[in-house]
Image (spheres, rainbow, N blue to C red):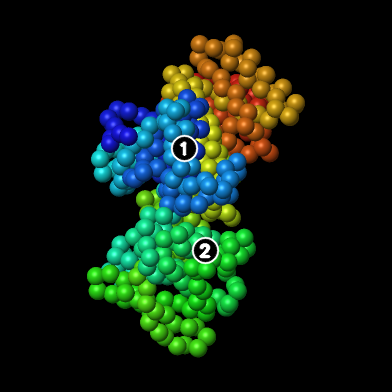
Amino acid sequence: MKAGVNMETIYDLLVLGGGPAGLAAGMYGARARMKTAIIEKGRPGGQAATTWDLENYPGFGRGTTGPGLTQAMADHAQSFGAEFIKDSIVSLDLKSFPKKVIGKKGEYLGKALVYALGAEPRMLKVPGEGKLRGKGVSYCATCDADLFEELEVAVVGSGDAAIEEAEYLSKFADQVSIIVIHEEGKVDANQVSFERAQQNPKIKWIWNSIVKNVNGDELVESITLKNIQTGEESDYLVNGVFIFIGTAPLTEFLPPEVQLNQQGYILTDEKMATSLEGLFAAGDVRAKYLRQVVTAASDGAIAAVAAEKYVHETELWEKEVINSKKPVLVAYYNPTDMSGTEKIGLVDRFVRANNERFSLVKVDATRNELVGRRYNITLDQLPKLHVFFNGEIKHEAAEINENNLTAINNLF
């Protein structure tokens, strides 16, 4: 693992976050021969590395562990040449090219970024929770279960994470009480996990209840529960409380130009592209229907492939158009429009007759999304002609004909 890199090092792909989404993106990026680095502040794996039992990753049956699977993913990415940088992100400069990531230990440059920082557990925000965090209050059963061997703990929540982590805790604790806000028999978890937990003699269910306080001086001693049907409050003796009430996306580093949904998750298209060019998002930080290891890995793979295409198109455009010493005629076309492609032939003949003065770049506007998005090229406008000089559009022709080509010839 590297602590930092020289600022002269420019990566083709920088992946922020080493969970399943980031690891998949790193693996696909490195395999595509992109110079790829994954920046992660801790051990690779993300939240999946804190989940012990992981039975639903395709091809890996019962007995699979989160730490084991994510370590295999990290090894896989590294085997293709992905670098791992251990650092904490401080800020991002996403408007420059290449984009800049500022960490505590160094600064890193990337032609494209995959933002895969994931989400963090939501807090109850009740008295005593913050004070006793790490002193009996936990958000990770895999991390802390062994600290509660032969003791009694409470789990707050009724989703998949709460029920599955309660089962894991039951391997260590004498009793695990699940605090559920819903009426008896109703949970937000999948039915298989719920039925299995119901058969566990170490698990106790407390329905229609919420936590009002976490109590204790140096360690958790009890929690104050309120029955939302009766309004009755009571202290419930436990040695620890594990909170699983959802997650909040880690988007604090993003500028306002990156569009988020009402819950703060990043909006992307099907290629994981965000509203900011060259920035892709993957995994739990993205607005999506299902947040699982398998969908995170899928996001990461798509993001890396899309990023590779973006980098390739950007570099080609910079070389052939933006940095050209001669005026460049850029002809946009639709290959399925025969009459339109015939008009491109006029431009081709014109440039060949004036090849010392002009150069030509033909753009299939149905495939090159980068250029189309940058210059607002729509299919109903094709064929279309732009003339670039010194990196700027100097002339635009909505139609391609001899008169427009003569005008271009006179202009330069």
Q: Is residue 358 left or right of residue 252?
A: right
Residue 250, position as x, y percentages in the image? 41, 54
Quarter of the picture containing the N terminus is top left
Q: Name the residue that disc number 2 marks.
A: 163
- Please name whichever residue, 159 or 409, is drawn nearer the observer in this view of the structure: 159
Indicate whether 108 appears above or below 158: above
Q: Earlier in the sequence, mark 2 or mark 1?
A: 1
Q: Name the residue that disc number 1 marks.
A: 72
Residue 354, position as x, y percentages in the image? 56, 12
Identify the residue shown where x is 37% and y is 62%: 149
Residue 61, position as x, y percentages in the image? 58, 45
Measured in 3D between alpha carbons, the distance from the residue under mark 2 to the one under mark 1, in whole angstroms, is: 26 Å
- Please name whichever residue, 131 or 64, is drawn nearer the observer in this view of the structure: 64
Provide the secondary structure element on which disc 2 rests. helix
Q: Which mark is residue 339?
A: none
Residue 116 in sight from this viewpoint: no
Identify the residue shown where x is 70% and y is 24%: 341
Indicate whether 191 appears above or below 368: below
Identify the residue shown where x is 38% and y is 55%: 143
Residue type at numbered disc 1: Ala
The outermost residue toward the right is 338
Residue type at numbered disc 2: Ile
- Please name whichever residue, 33 or 245, is drawn nearer the observer in this view of the structure: 245
Identify the residue shown where x is 26% and y is 44%: 104
Indicate whether 335 appears above or below 220: above
Residue 134, position as x, y percentages in the image? 30, 62
Indicate whether 1 appears above or below 165: above
**Do tag 2 and tag 1 residues touch (Cβ < 8 Å)?**
no
- Please name whichever residue, 214 or 284, is drawn nearer the observer in this view of the structure: 214
Q: Residues within 10 Å of mark 1 (few under 14, many from 20)?
A: some
